[in-house]
Image (cartoon, rainbow, N blue to C red):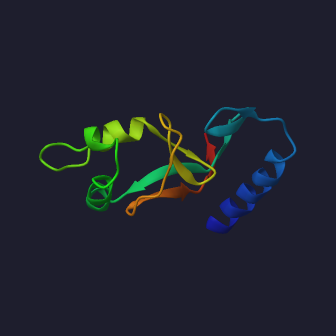
Amino acid sequence: MENETSFFEAKLREYVKTVKMKETKTQKSYSLPSGKLILKKDKEDFKVDKEKVLENIKKLEGYKEYIKTKEDLAWGELKKNLTIADGKIINKVTGEVLEIEGLDVEVKPGKFEVKF
């Protein structure tokens, strides 16, 4: 059964390359009479070690507001001002490329789905 499913999924992957798909920011999709073919795009997301980031962000000027008094990283507030571009973490406010130990870019691979 798994072999048959894999075979047909591979055929659908080939077919999806030949048709015009509806594209959004996060995925491409193509509707079929009995379902939908979905190709999710790769997604970059933050991979954070709060303890290391806290330890290292203390050394930077202009980031004190993101440190809570109980010495916990205000990750939610900091993340709002960060963006990922070309695999680098950039502060949207200052334009500074951040290289902080414990804060890296993690690429989550896209995946192919068939929904019925």
Residue that protrudes farthest toward the front in the picture: 61
Q: Is residue 112 left or right of residue 8?
A: left
Q: Which of the pair 42/37 is nearer the observer?
A: 42
Residue plotted at (27% across, 53% down)? 58
The N terminus appears in which quarter of the rendering?
bottom right
Q: How many marks?
A: 0
Residue 100's spot in the image, x, y percent? 41, 58
Residue plotted at (61% across, 52% down)? 110
Residue plotted at (64% across, 46% down)? 41
Residue 92's spot in the image, x, y percent? 50, 36
Q: Is residue 7 left or right of residue 71?
A: right
The C terminus appears in which quarter of the rendering?
top right
Asked whether the viewer can see residue 1, the reply is no
Residue plotted at (43% across, 36% down)? 81
Residue that protrudes farthest toward the left in the picture: 70
Residue that protrudes farthest toward the bottom in the picture: 3
The image quadrant of residue 53 is bottom left
Q: Which of the pair 28/71 is nearer the observer?
A: 71
Asked whether the viewer can see residue 15, the reply is yes
Residue that protrudes farthest toward the right in the picture: 18
Q: Which of the pair 38/86 is nearer the observer?
A: 86
The image quadrant of residue 102 is bottom left
Q: Which of the pair 23/95 is nearer the observer?
A: 95
Residue 67's spot in the image, x, y percent? 23, 44
The image quadrant of residue 14 is bottom right
Residue 52's spot in the image, x, y percent? 30, 62
